[in-house]
Image: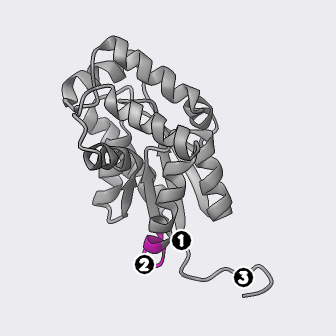
Amino acid sequence: MSGGQRPTHMGQVIAVCGMPGSGKGEFADVIANEGVPVLSMGDMVRAEVRRRSLEESPGIFGEIAAQLRAEYGEDVLAVRLADAVDELLQKHRLVLIEGMRGTAERTVFSARWGERFESLAVQASADVRFARIQHRGRSEDGDRASFEVRDAREIGWGLDQIIDEANHTIDNNQDLESFKLDCQNWYRQYAL
C-alpha cells in the first residue's frame, strides 16, 4: 500500500481510563451491549494472578501489575493487548480497551493506531469511588488505606495525566442509571 492509504477495514480504538472505582467497567458494559468488542487490561492482570496460582487479596493485583511493569516495561500490558485489538479491528468498526492506566500504555496505542486512537476518561470524586468500591466486592478491593495506596500507584504510572488529556470525558458523580444513559448517549453520538 502506498501514498498513506489505509486499509478500509481499519476501525477506531477507544481506551477508557479513570481512577479505581470511577466506572470504567460500567462504561465498558454499556458499550459492549451496543455490540462493540471490549478488551480489559485489568482482566490481563487478574489472569496473570490466576496463572501464578496466587491468592486473590487486595494488594496482589497491584503488586503483579507493578512486577510486570518492572520486569517488562511500563507498556507491557499495552504491547500484549495490541495484537488482539488489531485482530478485532478486522471485523469491527470500533474496539474498546477498558482500563488504560498510564502514559506508557497510551504511547503504545497512539503509535500503533495514530489518529484512529482516542481516549475517554470516566471521572468521579474519591469519596464516590471509595463508596462504590466498598459495594462491588472484588478481591482486589480493600479498605480506605489500600484504596489510597492504589490511587497513588496508578497516579505514579501517569493515570492522572492521561485522564486530564483524554479526548472525551464522562462525569460519573451520579447514580448508575443516569451514568448508563450518559454512556449510551455518548456512544450514539460518537458512532454516527
* Residue 103, horizontal then vertical, whole percent: 62, 40
Q: Residue at (49%, 44%) from the top-left corner?
A: 100
Which circle's residue, 2 or 3, is located before the other in the chain?
3
Residue occupied by mark 2:
91
* Residue 133, horizontal then vertical, whole percent: 28, 25
Residue occupied by mark 1:
11
Tag 2: amino acid: Lys
The stretch in magenta equals: 87-93
Residue occupied by mark 3:
5
Which circle's residue, 1 or 3, is located before the other in the chain?
3
CA distance separating discs 2 and 3: 19 Å
* Residue 148, horizontal then vertical, whole percent: 42, 16
Q: Residue at (56%, 39%) from the top-left corner?
A: 102
Look at the numbered disc 2 and give the secondary structure of its residue: loop
CA distance separating discs 2 and 1: 9 Å
Residue 67 is covered by the magenta coloring: no
Label 3 environment density (alpha carbons within 10 Å; few <14, some 14–19, many ≥20)? few
Q: Where residue 117 is drawn, which disc sits there?
A: none
Q: Cβ–Cβ below 8 Å for labels 1 and 3?
A: no
* Residue 121, horizontal then vertical, whole percent: 50, 39
Look at the numbered disc 1 and give the secondary structure of its residue: loop
Residue 167, can we see it? no
Q: Residue at (58%, 83%) from the top-left corner?
A: 8
Label 2 environment density (alpha carbons within 10 Å; few <14, some 14–19, many ≥20)? few
Residue 88, can we see it? yes
CA distance separating discs 1 and 3: 14 Å
